[in-house]
């Protein structure tokens, strides 16, 4: 009763048959309770648009009538949702033997009034936000082999540098072509003409990182040049000759013993 009033509550209870039956009705059906079907006999010669479509008893609620016409259907849906919650709270209080109070209905009514008031407020004017302060600090760029290749690919060559240069006090073609940048710049002169014949092929710069040094050491480990020697200096025996292939021969014999086709079944445990 505190939410929609005693008269409206009596109409809803009479149409459903009691509080328990009203508590089982969902909110989408509560807003249609009391809706008369529009027929020729029900109209009785009156206008067809005299009643709001898809609305029942709740359209005559005080909260809904206080809203403008373009917000009434929206307000009916909001009131139906709160009414379903309030009816279920009353039904639970009755079933459990607790005393029914109007606190829930008053709370929901204040919430709906606040919500409807915000709906009627005009939209806020669009505010033009100022651009953020530019970040002038130099950011750390990601390096690596791929980035270095990309930089070297689009790097300005010596030929392009000579074409972009201009010689002072030297007539090179027409003035209009020189002003528009159509000429070849220093390439048309004697100083820059030799640049076409020389092509410089540079290798990609190698990164001096721990991974690159380790990779280079692994690649050069198996390479034996003309300065390689089998002479080894030991602190106890002095200078001695060492066979560099002795370790490979030992591995080959072990493979023949354990993993060859003729090895058969052997035990790896030490003999007693």
Image (cartoon, rainbow, N blue to C red):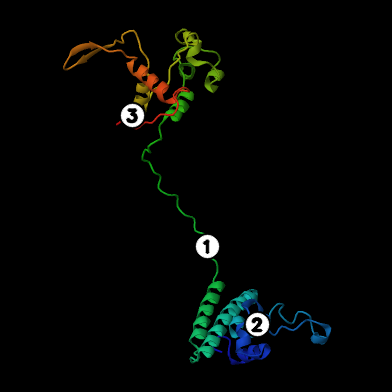
Looking at the rendering, which quadrant does residue 55 occupy?
bottom right
Q: CA distance from mark 2 to mark 1?
A: 32 Å
Q: 167 or 25, which lies in front?
A: 25
- Total marks placed: 3
Q: Residue at x 52, y 12 (%)?
A: 172
10 Å crowding of disc 2: few (<14), some (14-19), many (20+): many
Which residue position holds label 1? 125
Among the two numbered marks 3 and 1 on one chain, the one whose residue lies closer to the N terminus: 1
Q: Nearer the viewer, mark 2 or mark 1?
A: 2
Q: Quadrant of the C terminus?
A: top left
Q: Which residue is located at x 66 percent, y 87 percent? A: 16
Task: Report x, y in % for residue 175.
Answer: 54, 17
Q: Out of 26 and 222, give the one closest to the viewer.
A: 222
Q: Which residue is mark 2?
A: 59
Instruction: Give the labeled residue for mark 3.
Output: 210
Image-based side of 225 in relation to 181, left or right? left
Kindly tell me whether residue 67 is visible in this rendering.
Answer: no
Q: At x 64% / y 85%, what residue is drawn?
A: 60
CA–CA distance between discs 2 and 3?
79 Å
Crowdedness near tag 1: few (<14), some (14–19) or many (≥20) residues, C-alpha within 10 Å: few
| Marks 3/1: CA–CA distance | 59 Å
**Residue 128 in the image: above or below residue 123:** above
Q: Quadrant of the rendered structure where residue 121 is?
A: bottom right
Q: Sequence order check: which comes first, mark 2 or mark 1? A: 2
Q: Nearer the viewer, mark 2 or mark 3?
A: 3
Q: x, y (%) of residue 146?
A: 46, 29
Do the residues under discs 2 and 3 have CB atoms within 8 angstroms?
no
Q: Secondary structure at mark 3?
A: helix
Asked if 246 appears above or below 93 in the picture, the reply is: above
Image quadrant holding the N terminus, namely: bottom right
């Amino acid at each position: 009763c505190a939410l929609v009033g005693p008269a409206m509550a009596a109409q809803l209870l009479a149409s459903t048959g009691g509080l328990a039956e009203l508590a089982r009705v969902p909110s989408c059906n509560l807003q249609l309770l009391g809706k008369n079907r529009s027929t020729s006999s029900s109209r009785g010669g009156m206008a067809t648009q005299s009643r709001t479509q898809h609305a029942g008893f709740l359209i005559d609620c005080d909260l809904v009538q206080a809203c403008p016409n373009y917000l009434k259907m929206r307000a009916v849906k909001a009131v139906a949702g709160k009414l379903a919650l309030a009816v279920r709270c009353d039904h639970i209080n009755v079933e459990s033997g607790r005393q029914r109070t109007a606190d829930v209905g008053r709370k929901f009514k204040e919430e709906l009034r606040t919500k409807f008031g915000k709906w009627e407020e005009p939209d806020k004017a669009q505010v033009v936000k100022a651009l953020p302060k530019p970040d002038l600090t130099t950011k750390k760029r990601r390096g690596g082999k791929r980035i270095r290749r990309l930089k070297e690919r689009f790097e300005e060559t010596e030929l392009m540098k000579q074409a972009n240069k201009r010689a002072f006090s030297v007539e090179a073609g027409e003035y209009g072509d020189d002003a528009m940048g159509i000429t070849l710049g220093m390439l048309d002169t004697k100083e820059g003409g030799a640049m076409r014949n020389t092509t410089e092929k540079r290798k990609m710069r190698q990164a001096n990182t721990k991974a690159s040094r380790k990779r280079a050491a692994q690649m050069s480990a198996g390479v034996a040049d003309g300065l390689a020697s089998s002479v080894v200096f030991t602190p106890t025996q002095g200078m001695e000759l060492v066979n560099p292939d002795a370790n490979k021969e030992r591995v080959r014999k072990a493979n023949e013993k354990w993993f060859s086709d003729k090895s058969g079944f052997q035990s790896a445990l030490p003999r007693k």
